Amino acid sequence: MRCIEFFVLEDTSKEYGMGFLFPDKDGDNKPLYIEINGLVEFTGFDINGAKSGMSFQEIIDKLGYVKPEHVLWWHSVARIDLYILNYDINGLKYSFVSDDEQGKWTELYIALDGTSNSLSNDPLENLCYKRIQDYTLDDCFVILNSTMNDIGKAYNIDASKVFGGLTLLGNTSWQPMVCLDQGILLVCPIQDHPNDNKVAGNASPFIIYFSGNDGESCVIDGFQFGMPLDQVDQELLVTAKDSFFHIYSGDPIPAKWIGIFEKGMEIRLAFKQDLEKDCYYLDNICVELNEN
């Protein structure tokens, strides 16, 4: 999972109450944010009475209710869970950030060029904060309509090279793919020979492949990885079709799949047979645009 990465070139926030966050280590670009430290008495700076160091409830009392957002964030070298209240006031984005889910204490970050540097303004950039169980169909739609170049930039991955091959349900040949995050793969377009080990950067991915831990939900409400097929609603269960998983040694593994069509996409839920337990369980979910 890629998170926005910031570098504090000279941390003055502890001494002066204010610091600057940059998009790179060299400092050649202008800072993205001003950081207001709540531990330092920074006289006179507040937004309609709300200021750094307050709790979420105190801030909401001053500025009105917004739903806290949960993100993962790189700050220098640390990767941490953060909870954020975002406010757009007079053309600026104010983000009150806490590492406590209840927001007992906050620091304030101000985007220097307005909403373009918001912690959660760009739909594609937002996705890099998410865990696999937080992805929705709307998120899939954003990815499937983005170029591989833009996806690589947003997730801070090298999306220019084929990561490996993925054999999809009912197929015997592998499909070139890029690893977006743990448990999330993209079946991607490649360039023509002789550059067929390189991704076509200006094209969009064909398929998003999700494979999570048992009990994790993803994309479609009511489904969790590892759930038995017989727990599926009868209305969907009767639509299950026979298929197989190809393996390179031995016989194919029997499988069943269910197709769901929502929001202009086809979602295929693939259930693999567990030979020992004599049942089918949800192994992966594939999402692609429905061209029909």
Image (cartoon, rainbow, N blue to C red):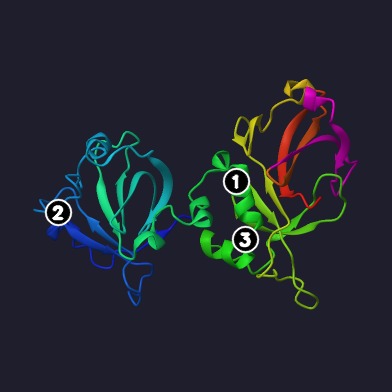
Q: CA distance from mark 1 to mark 2?
A: 38 Å
Q: Is residue 55 visible?
A: yes
Amino acid type, residue under disc 1 in the picture: Asp
Q: Which residues are magenta?
A: 235-262
Which quadrant of the figure has residue 241? top right
Rendering coords of residue 57 (x, y %) = 26, 34
Q: Position of residue 190 (x, y in %)?
A: 74, 68
At numbered mark 2, what does the secondary structure look like: helix, strand or loop?
Answer: loop
Q: Which mark is residue 146?
A: 3
Label placed on residue 138: 1
Q: Which residue is mark 2?
A: 45
Three-letter amino acid code at the position of disc 3: Ser
Is residue 243 in the magenta section? yes
- In the rendered image, the residue lying farthest to the front is 90
Q: Nearer the viewer, residue 286 or 144?
A: 144
| Earlier sequence position, callout 3 versus callout 1 | 1
Sequence-first disc among 1 and 2: 2
Q: Quadrant of residue 55?
A: top left
Q: In what element is the residue under mark 1?
A: helix
Residue 19 position (above or below residue 282) = below
* Upstream in sequence: badge 3 or badge 2: 2
